[in-house]
Amino acid sequence: MTVCVAPGAALLTPTAAGAAGSTNDDSYHNLGAPDRNEWMWGVASNTMLSDMSIPGTHDTLSIHGGNYVETQENYGDSGQTLRAQFDRGIRAIDIRVRSIGGKFTIHHASYYQKANFDDVLKKTRDFLKANPHETIVMRLRAECLDKDEKGSPTDCKNEPENVTQEQIRSTFDTYVKEYPGLFYAHSVKGDGKAGIPRLGDGRGKLVLAGFDNAEAGGYGIRTPVRATAEVSTAR
């Protein structure tokens, strides 16, 4: 599923439609040619991200688990699908992580997507190093922490979870330290949400728009990013 987003309300908020059931799936099967590496170079650096329409994907790396889970064209595991999206102009990503053994793995609820958060950060770092005029906006979400009225996880088939939000934030902070210079610093300080940056401030950086299920972390930008138009539909 691909959406256009503009900073202003909530980054890549899931719509009511699920991954399956649509017959209009041409864009799902083909995001286009890998020739959009540098489309931001012509945008003035003093442009606020909130004044831009940024193409993005919902459940960016969900390529395994069947029709009701898969949302993207599969270009390969370990972040290969992410790099393929970057090459095709995607600049807003929706990454869902699960904390296992002090590391983040990429999941859609309980479904492992055969990629880890290191894959996401390495692919993003390599892309931005090769294309320093671009910026990537990321919505991050910790999976398997939503609870029902009985205290059981609602999005992971009631699997037992012992991970706390404090542990989630600590693990994320470790990743930030392991990738110095990659993140737009104000969005990951954890001391209160930053204002929306200008494009020039975000060039060559990964801007964290928000971190769902990491309450009280102070991560992200103060005015999040909203999905404004769905431009392709997953199968």
Image (cartoon, rainbow, N blue to C red):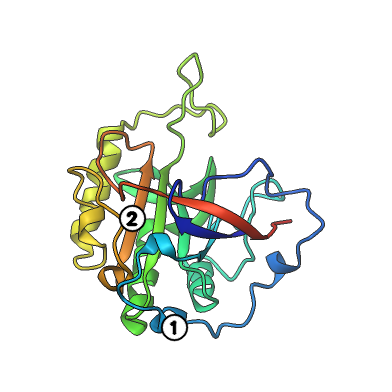
Residue at 54% across / 52% down in the picture? Answer: 227
Query: Where the N terminus falls, by quadrant?
Result: bottom right
| In this rendering, position of residue 1 left or right of residue 91 | right
Q: Give the CA separation, mark 2 to mark 1.
A: 20 Å
Mark 1 crowd level (few <14, some 14–19, many ≥20, 10 Å Cα): some
Q: Is residue 155 left or right of residue 31?
A: left
Name the residue beneath numbered marker 1: 38
Quadrant containing the C terminus is bottom right
Relative image position of residue 87 (x, y in whole percent): 51, 78
Q: Position of residue 161 (x, y in %)?
A: 41, 29
Amino acid type at image mark 1? Glu
User: x%, y% of residue 195?
Assistant: 27, 52
Compared with 208, 37 (above or below) is: below
Residue at position x 48%, y 73% in the image = 86
Amino acid type for the residue under numbered disc 2: Leu
Contact, mark 2 vs mark 1 (Cβ under 8 Å): no
Residue closer to the observer: 146 or 101: 146
Numbered label attached to residue 208: 2
Residue 62 numbered tag: none
| Left or right: where 232 falls relative to 4 | right
Q: Position of residue 70 (x, y in %)?
A: 64, 53
Q: Is residue 105 above or below residue 124?
A: above
Q: Mark 2 or mark 1: which comes first in sequence?
A: 1
Residue 1 appears in view: no
